[in-house]
């Protein structure tokens, strides 16, 4: 299939257009997603193409419109809810965690909840503590949810299409500093399966496991490490729940060393989960303790120097790798 | 005189009462786990409202949900089996009292979160409008839940978009373990509809015919595309918040008054039916006896049903998990 280079944002926009074209039950809902085209511009052109009923601008009522999305999904529609920042999802945790995630199980398997919640996560742009969090571990902690964090335009499009077609609630987290990134995206229709990791760079000397923007950091670090004679394999987990532990375990069995990178803060973060799972499954294959690179255990600060110090960086990943040899 | 409708409404009210009394007995015998909430005394609301609905209409319910489920046509056998945690229950024994749902009947679930069903109802009403299928959604909730933020958030959207939604606030006078009036800045709950531009109507929630009439008007308005209505149905919670509630916050005399012939919704409806010579006493007593048999059969079905297999623990967390 031929490819072209497009932005992450455009790839998501194409996924929305294609899925709304394909299935009349798919609609988007959220703050300024319609007439304005989305604060993130991911829904640009949707209102013009599909009209107000399928591109629903809402009041600033996160719990209300997210809950409305859950109810609409229970009633058979396929809502794509946009929560402008993942920080704002805290206002909507009730419908997400108590209603959407539980409905299938508590209703004896009869309820489909074909809901996607698209949201913007991560730091690095000076948005400070209430607009920069990486809360993926919060949702990855909840049985009944699927949690996705794409790193490339191609994955973003294919994963969003799969998320929309899936019959379970999906938390789809887009990193704010990935929207403008570019990459090759196939011309025609394709899907990327949920729950499958992807080896973004093969290597033999160690495994770096990450997701979202941290994959880009890991790949850059891997290039620099290669120049130093260390050949890192970079695994992009893509879906945090359910986690494709098989791909991670296979990689560690080959490389015998593991660094996990996650932008969430250290305590109780997803990096801790990755480490624990690896210790449970491939402890005997490890030649060195697992090292994690995470954000510091602080609210994300505004000042640029402080924010950079709080977040993972390429250098921190390289330092972690060096500590293994 | 719509005799068939009246007989069905009477049957449903008795069914709910006897179901609840049976559930209470099972709970007291330690045959149920967790907590359960009785709808006794509020039967006229669920029955009067649901009698105004069609099959394609949906409801959302509450933690005090058995009555809504039965009124919308739920199967007492599968409900009773669920209360006993059996594999044949509505939720395969994994939900219990507060999570009974029958999506095929438009029952979008009881709810363990006070007010949890309110935003789901807005979604179901939105779906009806989206499909333009003429369906409406009824959102049952209480005079405690009306203080939740999601009522105000979704009432705004429902008013704004004229969703086919009927808010039924069951004003049973209690918010968990307190009188609800302690938490209402203004005691007139119909006013809660005013800022959102739809009518708020008060109705005697222990008069099934009054409830039914008010519900019919609200449903007709919703089907016409004119938007939501808030019905405030005045009633009284005869039992505690949960079974086992010590009820230290109210007097026995007050409860007895509400249980008397002037207030009890079943006694009142029965008196109406007899006074207006709609039915002979014998016909109603025969019906009561039929319902008693039905409830006994439901208990027997539940008791004879198997517990879930251990494998069920891991089933239905995610489903239809295909990457089509």
Image: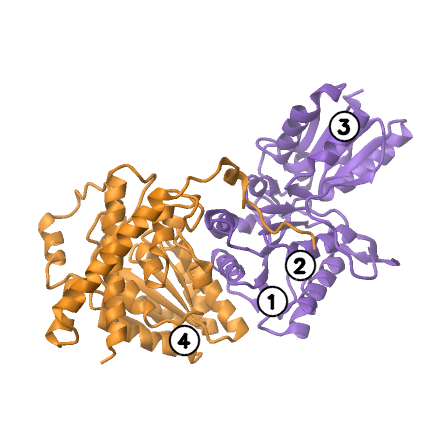
Chain colours: A purple, B orange
Mark 3–mark 2 Cα distance, whole angstroms, equals 37 Å
Does any portion of residue B180 appear in the rendered image?
A: no
Q: Nearer the viewer, mark 3 or mark 2?
A: 3
The image shows residue B8, relative to residue A298, as above or below, that is below
Q: Earlier in the sequence, mark 3 or mark 2?
A: 2
Question: On the picture, is A97 further left or further right than B252?
Answer: right
Query: What secondary structure is marked by label 3?
Result: helix
Image position of B208 (left or right of A227): left
Q: Chain of mark 4?
A: B
State which quarter of the image contains the C terminus of chain B. Answer: bottom right
Label 3 neighbour load within 10 Å: few <14, some 14-19, many 20+: many
Q: Which residue is mark 4?
A: B222
What residue is shown with label 1?
A: A25
Instruction: Kindly report the distance in space between the C-alpha atoms of the residues bearing marks 2 and 1.
Output: 23 Å
* Residues at marks 1 and 4, CA–CA distance in whole angstroms: 22 Å
Give the residue displayed 44% in from the left and 59% down from the top: B108
């Amino acid at each position: 299939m031929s490819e072209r280079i497009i932005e992450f944002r455009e790839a998501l926009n194409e996924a929305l257009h294609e899925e709304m074209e394909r299935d009349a039950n798919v609609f988007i809902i959220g703050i300024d997603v319609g007439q304005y085209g989305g604060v993130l511009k991911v829904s640009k052109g949707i209102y013009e193409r599909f009209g107000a009923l399928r591109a629903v601008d809402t009041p600033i009522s996160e719990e209300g419109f997210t809950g409305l999305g859950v109810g609409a999904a229970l009633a058979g529609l396929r809502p794509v809810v946009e929560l402008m920042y993942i920080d704002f999802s805290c206002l909507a945790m009730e419908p997400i965690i108590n209603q959407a995630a539980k409905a299938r199980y508590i209703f004896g398997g009869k309820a489909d909840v074909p809901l996607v919640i698209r949201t913007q996560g991560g730091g690095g742009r000076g948005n400070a503590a209430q607009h920069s969090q990486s809360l993926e571990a919060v949702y990855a902690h909840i049985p009944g949810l699927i949690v996705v964090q794409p790193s490339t335009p191609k994955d973003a499009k294919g994963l969003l299409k799969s998320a929309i077609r899936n019959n379970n609630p999906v938390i789809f987290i887009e990193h704010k500093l990935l929207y403008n990134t570019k990459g090759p995206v196939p011309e025609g229709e394709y899907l990327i399966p949920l729950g499958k990791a992807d080896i973004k760079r093969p290597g033999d000397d160690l495994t770096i496991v990450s997701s979202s923007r941290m994959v880009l950091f890991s790949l850059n670090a891997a290039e620099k490490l290669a120049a130093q004679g260390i050949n890192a394999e970079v695994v992009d987990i893509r879906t945090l729940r359910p986690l494709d532990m098989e791909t991670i375990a296979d990689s560690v069995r080959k490389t015998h060393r593991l660094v996990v990178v996650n932008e969430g803060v250290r305590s109780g973060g997803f990096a801790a989960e990755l480490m624990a799972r690896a210790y449970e499954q491939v402890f005997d294959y490890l030649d060195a303790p697992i090292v994690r690179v995470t954000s510091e255990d602080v609210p994300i600060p505004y000042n640029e120097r402080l924010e950079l110090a709080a977040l993972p960086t390429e250098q921190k990943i390289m330092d972690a790798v060096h500590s293994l040899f | 005189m719509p005799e068939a409708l009246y007989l069905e409404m009477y049957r449903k009210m008795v069914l709910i009462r006897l179901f609840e009394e049976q559930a209470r007995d099972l709970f007291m015998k330690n045959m149920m786990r967790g907590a359960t909430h009785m709808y006794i005394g509020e039967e006229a609301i669920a029955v009067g409202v649901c009698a105004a609905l069609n099959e394609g209409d949906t409801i959302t319910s509450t933690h005090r949900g058995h009555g809504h489920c039965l009124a919308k046509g739920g199967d007492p056998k599968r409900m009773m089996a669920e209360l006993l945690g059996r594999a044949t229950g509505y939720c395969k024994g994994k939900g219990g009292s507060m999570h009974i749902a029958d999506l095929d009947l438009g029952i979008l679930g009881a709810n363990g979160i006070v007010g949890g069903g309110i935003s789901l109802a807005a979604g179901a009403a939105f779906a009806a409008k989206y499909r333009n299928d003429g369906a409406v959604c009824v959102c049952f909730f209480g005079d405690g839940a009306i203080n939740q933020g999601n009522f105000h958030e979704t009432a705004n959207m429902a008013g704004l978009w004229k969703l086919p939604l009927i808010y039924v606030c069951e004003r049973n006078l209690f918010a968990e373990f307190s009188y609800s009036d302690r938490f209402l800045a203004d005691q007139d709950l119909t006013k809660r509809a005013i800022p959102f531009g739809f009518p708020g109507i008060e109705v005697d929630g222990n008069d099934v015919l009054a409830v039914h009439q008010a519900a019919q008007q609200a449903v007709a308005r919703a089907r016409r595309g004119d938007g939501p209505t808030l019905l405030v149905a005045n009633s009284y919670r005869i039992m505690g918040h949960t079974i086992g509630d010590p009820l230290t916050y109210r007097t026995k005399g007050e409860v007895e008054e509400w249980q008397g012939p002037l207030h009890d919704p079943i006694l009142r409806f029965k008196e109406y039916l007899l006074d207006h010579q709609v039915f002979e006493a014998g016909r109603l007593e025969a019906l009561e006896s039929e319902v008693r048999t039905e409830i006994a059969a439901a208990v027997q079905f539940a008791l004879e049903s198997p517990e879930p297999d251990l494998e069920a623990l891991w089933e239905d967390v995610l489903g239809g998990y295909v990457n089509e």
